[in-house]
Structures are given as structure tokens and as C-alpha cells.
Image: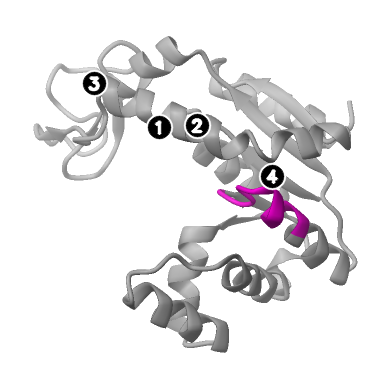
């Protein structure tokens, strides 16, 4: 099972990808993580990426495809992969088809977590974490049982991400729409796109994704 998981920052992609990895043994392929790993490994394509990045230039589609190809050849991807942050252009979508076909694979689903922009702003702006253990909380939806004290480790220090503000979230939404606009029509024409309400309860979102993957 090979899928693309789409959704703006804060839509819950990370949570759902983690569950798919735990439940189905799938592997999440995030281009940013893979680039860093390839550079660290010193593989031929990783060294190429390193020189480009050190020069302050954007990594080409060819290099990104090479890194994804390398990753797809690893044995842990046998149960399927979740593409996160790739493809972002029509050219990358075409390259992904070629990468999968060369390995006897195919793309099964493109799942988009749909969100309500105003509700997403509220969800993101209200979130904060324990500064010590990283447990997540929210002003409205998940406050510590004892005010000001972390449920997990008892710390009284909390922090918020500086970019978790309304203006930044709305900018991210605009960027997301700009990035997905070129690829969604390609996959819609092939009948691969399914949409899930990303604003629903986390378990409901998981169930909806599972139903799509199981063909229900």
C-alpha cells in the first residue's frame, strides 16, 4: 500500500502517519527527513544533495527523486509507504510514478485531511507543550488536570512555538493550497483522491483513513 497524505500544517498528518506506521508497518517518507539522512549517510546522491545545500541552492527534482528511489529500495518499505511533502509539482508526480513503476509498485490512494481554516487557526494558536517532557496541551481542548502542572512529569514550565500564531497559520494555508493545487487535479483524474474531515476527533479520522485503505 503506497499513499500520499496531504493536509496543511496542523491538520494532523503526523499523528495519522504515526498510527499507520504502528498499525500497518508502513514507513513515512518525509522529503526533509530523507534529505538529512542521505546527507548524513554519505551516499552518492546524498553527497550531491550536500554540495547543493551548502551552496544555498534548492535541491533539484532529480536529486530528490534519487533519494526517494534509494529509500524505496530499503527492505523496511515492503509493507508500503506514506509520502509526506512529496510530490509538490506535476513534474514530481510524474517522477513518482516512474520510481514506483520501476520497482513494481503503484500509488494506491491520495488522502487529503480537509480542514476549516478558522477552526484550524484556533486549534494551532491554542496549543502548547510541557517544556520538560514535551507533553502536548491546548487552551480549550486539553488542559492539565491540575492547572499549571504537567500531567506526565509534574513540571510547571510550558512553552509555545513562536510560529503558532494566527497570521503564520493563515500564511501556511495559502502556501499549502499553492503547493497542492498543481497535483490534486492529476490524481483526481485518476480517481485516487479521497478526503477525510481533518477537524474530526483523532480516532474518527483514523477510522476514516482505515476504511479508505481497506476499500470500504
In which image quadrant can residue 171 be found? Answer: top left
Which image quarter holds the C terminus? top right
In which image quadrant can residue 111 be found? Answer: top right
Q: Disc 1 marks which residue? A: 172
CA gap between label 1 and label 4 equals 19 Å
Disc 3 element: loop
| Mark toward the viewer: 3 or 4 | 4
Tell me: 29 left or right of 107: left
Tell me: 154 left or right of 139: left
> Looking at the image, is mark 3 or mark 2 earlier in the sequence?
2
Q: Position of residue 175 (x, y in %)?
A: 45, 34
Please tell me which residue lies in front, 20 or 118. 118
CA gap between label 2 and label 4 equals 13 Å
| Mark toward the viewer: 1 or 2 | 1
Q: Would residue 25 be visible to someone looking at this image?
A: no
Q: Disc 4 marks which residue? A: 4
Amino acid at each position: 500500500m503506497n499513499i500520499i497524505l496531504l493536509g496543511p500544517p496542523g491538520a494532523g498528518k503526523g499523528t495519522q502517519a504515526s498510527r499507520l506506521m504502528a498499525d500497518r508497518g508502513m514507513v513515512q517518507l518525509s522529503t526533509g527527513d530523507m534529505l538529512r539522512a542521505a546527507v548524513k549517510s554519505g551516499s552518492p546522491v546524498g553527497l550531491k544533495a550536500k554540495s547543493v545545500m551548502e551552496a544555498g541552492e534548492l535541491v533539484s527534482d532529480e536529486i530528490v527523486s534519487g533519494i526517494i528511489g534509494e529509500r524505496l529500495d530499503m527492505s523496511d518499505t515492503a509493507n508500503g509507504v506514506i509520502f509526506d511533502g512529496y510530490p509538490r509539482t506535476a513534474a514530481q508526480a510524474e517522477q513518482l510514478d516512474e520510481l514506483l513503476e520501476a520497482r513494481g509498485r503503484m500509488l494506491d490512494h491520495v488522502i487529503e485531511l480537509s480542514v476549516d481554516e478558522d477552526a484550524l487557526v484556533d486549534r494551532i494558536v491554542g496549543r502548547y507543550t510541557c517544556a520538560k517532557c514535551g507533553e502536548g496541551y491546548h487552551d480549550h481542548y486539553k488542559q492539565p488536570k491540575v492547572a499549571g502542572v504537567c500531567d506526565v512529569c509534574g513540571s510547571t514550565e510550558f512553552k509555545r512555538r513562536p510560529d503558532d500564531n494566527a497570521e503564520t497559520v493563515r500564511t501556511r494555508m495559502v502556501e499549502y493550497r499553492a503547493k497542492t493545487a498543481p497535483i490534486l487535479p492529476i490524481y483526481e483524474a485518476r480517481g485516487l483522491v479521497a478526503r477525510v474531515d481533518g477537524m474530526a476527533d483523532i480516532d474518527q479520522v483514523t477510522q476514516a483513513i482505515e476504511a479508505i485503505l481497506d476499500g470500504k
